[in-house]
Amino acid sequence: MADNRGLVIVFTGNGKGKTTAALGMALRAWGQGMKILVLQFIKGGWVYGELLASGKLAGFEIRQLGEGFIREGGKDAEVHKQAARKALEEARGEITSGRWDMVILDEIVYALGYNLFEEQELLDLISLKPPELHLVLTGRGAPRSLIDRADLVTEMKEVKHPYRQGMKAQKGVEF
Amino acid sequence: MADNRGLVIVFTGNGKGKTTAALGMALRAWGQGMKILVLQFIKGGWVYGELLASGKLAGFEIRQLGEGFIREGGKDAEVHKQAARKALEEARGEITSGRWDMVILDEIVYALGYNLFEEQELLDLISLKPPELHLVLTGRGAPRSLIDRADLVTEMKEVKHPYRQGMKAQKGVEF
């Protein structure tokens, strides 16, 4: 029951708000003077509001590592696997670097769900965490082993989504 | 199906991440150059990481309007009701002011759940929204009428929480 224990936090589920909640957590931690790194395991190649924001905030860095979302007829699985493996490697280095107070591994659980790496590799990565570091993991489909390892797990459940009603993605909300 | 339609977004449920997701949404929108106002219907008197952060971000303002969380043996219900009524009034003014691209009414749904005002008053407030404004509402227990009115609803479901394991709230995560 140490007072400054870093938590392992998971945002999972099929609803909106996983990455968004992680960003909010980053903003809150940044407000407390913490240094935050976000490694995006999936969203390669996009320009997001959060990238624009982090560019303006000292001590808050976002790196896009992965390829785009995996679709039928999209890039070869091997391309995704290689990108995910490189991302894991980078995550290991940063988690153990002592440079950050919070590291967010965005969509790493989604990448795991597509078998871009093994469940055990993710658990091994978490075990590298220094005690005081907050580690945040997002993505749908968190496996039991991750939930068991985590301190705080929230499932985002989609109740209603505008895409279902034919509405387009909105600037400042979706991207 | 306009391209710049402002959405009504609800984060509800019993899990962590409702306010946090709203903050992440604020950060994303801020990154896009939008002007954001957060009105906190409940969290009076606390100092949060998000307050510290917003103080550093131009065009991102947070105002604490409500009293603290409602507890048995706490402040008189009438005190909470008056604070909520004033907060609603301020929300009406700001939503129609044209000054903001996104207004976040944090914990307004929680306040509604404690009958600090009527469901119809909340729906009337939403109906004042200019078409292009994004309106974000958070708090557990969103009623059917609000879900019907909203464009995007996510329920945050608690899967695992560190308090249950005797861990204290952590700086940068909980506050």
Image (cartoon, coloured by chain):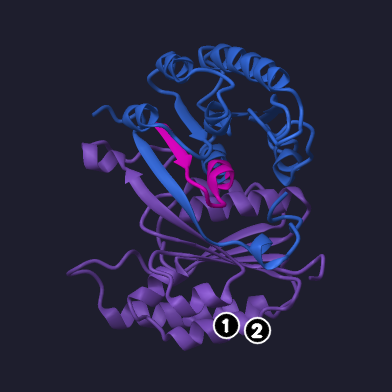
Chain colours: A blue, B purple
Q: Label 2 sits on what residue type?
A: Leu
On the image, the x and y values in percent for residue A97 come to: 55, 12
Q: Residues within 10 Å of mark 1 (few under 14, many from 20)?
A: some
Magenta-colored span: A7-23
Q: Is residue B126 left or right of residue A142?
A: right
On residue A1, the disc is: none
Element carrying mark 1: helix
On the image, the x and y values in percent for residue A56 come to: 74, 39
Q: Which residue is mark 1?
A: B125
Mark 2 touching mark 1, by CB under 8 A? yes
Asked if residue A17 lies in the magenta stretch, the reply is: yes
Q: Kindly tell me whether residue A38 is visible in this rendering.
A: yes
Q: Label 1 sits on what residue type?
A: Leu
| Residue appearing at x 69%, y 35% in the figure | A69
Q: Which residue is mark 2?
A: B128
- Tell me which corner region of the image, top left, top right, bottom left or bottom right, holds residue A111: top right
Asked if residue B28 lies in the magenta stretch, the reply is: no
The answer to whether A136 is drawn above or below residue A123 in the figure is below
Q: Is residue A138 left or right of residue B102?
A: left
| Residue appearing at x 73%, y 19% in the figure | A79
On the image, the x and y values in percent for residue B45 come to: 40, 60
Image mark 1: chain: B
The N terminus of chain B: image quadrant: bottom right
| Residue appearing at x 63%, y 81% in the figure | B93
